[in-house]
Amino acid sequence: MTRVLITGASGRFAPFVIDALRHDYELVLTSRTPPAERYKDLPWIKADITQFDDCRRMVEGIDVIQHQGANPYPSDHPRIREQMSERGDDLPDLDYTMQANIMGPYYLLMSAVEAGVKTVVMTGSNCAFGQGYRISDRPFPVKYLPMDEEHPSDVEDSYSYSKLAGEELLAQFTRAYGIRTYMTRPSGICPEDRLRNMAANAKPCTGWSEWMFAYVPSVDLASMQKLIMEQADTLPAHDVFVANALDSSLLEPTMEVIERFRPELAPLCRGISGHDALFSPKKAQRVLGWEQTVSWRDFL
């Protein structure tokens, strides 16, 4: 049976990957802190992906890696650090995001090559486009909507850069060593309680958001990453997939909000109707056969 390593097992998204895979694969979990009690029957390795020796230890005997371990924000972002200081939070090291999101995957990939791992599927972020966590006053340069995998990136912060660079790091290892590597670009990963909360608190839009009203249900992201893993032998050796819901988080039709708050973007829109999302998962639908199974609108 295929042996799959799931990193970041104690995080918020990894349990959905575990649940999607546990009945069909032999799983090994790894994280710095223990995963949920319901996974106590699965082997767990206490490890830190920023430590090369830990990575070597966790990949022994592994066929496939589903990598979720990451720092989810830019630790050096001026405004975020200011907000943390105002709340009295402990400030992380400036380079914490770069260590976790760049050196961590590098150590993991080097270890994977040494161990003969066949496939790596990594959870990235649609921040690789660069639309969020802006630092300058320069607006994100939208070329067309909805954005897909071919849309140019314009990152300004360490988190977004780490996700964009992570895609190229995977591609580098595929070119050099032949390991099959894949990255998803999810946005606003939502378990069911968050979807229900979105519905319970839905209000008319009052302004534009740099996050562009995007989300993806956790179960549907997990199913996409399972499909990628299972179809890896028929896919290009390296690829990237936008992982977004088909619909937006808006109550109003998408074009209505664009025309009201960002009318200059209206001429850049391609076939957007109804509540269509501004990030397109059509490649995943076409190539993988992926489909969305739940929406926050189901709970209205």
Image (cartoon, rainbow, N blue to C red):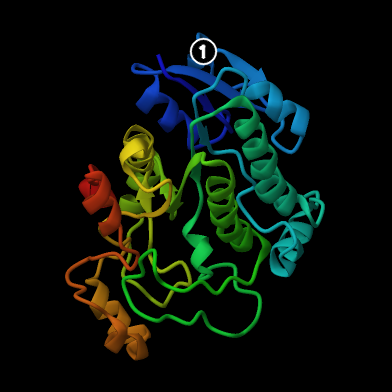
Between 81 and 284, the residue placed more toward the observer is: 284
Which residue is at a point 72% across and 53% down the rendered structure image? Answer: 98
Compared across the picture, whether 268 is left or right of 168 comes to left
Compared across the picture, whether 250 is left or right of 179 comes to left
Expressed as whole percent of the image width and height from the top left, the position of residue 195 reads: 34, 46
Which residue is at a point 78% across and 55% down the rendered structure image? Answer: 95
Residue 145, relative to residue 161: is it above or below? below
Residue 2, relative to residue 166: is it above or below? above
Which quadrant is the N terminus positioned in? top left
- Find numbered disc 1 in the image and state the secondary structure of the residue it sits on: loop
Expressed as whole percent of the image width and height from the top left, the position of residue 205 reads: 34, 72
Expressed as whole percent of the image width and height from the top left, the position of residue 7 reads: 57, 31
Expressed as whole percent of the image width and height from the top left, the position of residue 290 reads: 25, 45
Between 186 and 173, the residue placed more toward the observer is: 173
Three-letter residue code for mark 1: Leu
Between 117 and 266, the residue placed more toward the observer is: 117
Between 173 and 194, the residue placed more toward the observer is: 173
Q: Which residue is mark 1?
A: 42
Which residue is at a point 38% across and 24% down the rendered structure image? Answer: 21
Quarter assignment of residue 156? bottom right
Compared across the picture, whether 178 is left or right of 259 comes to right
Residue at the extreme top: 41
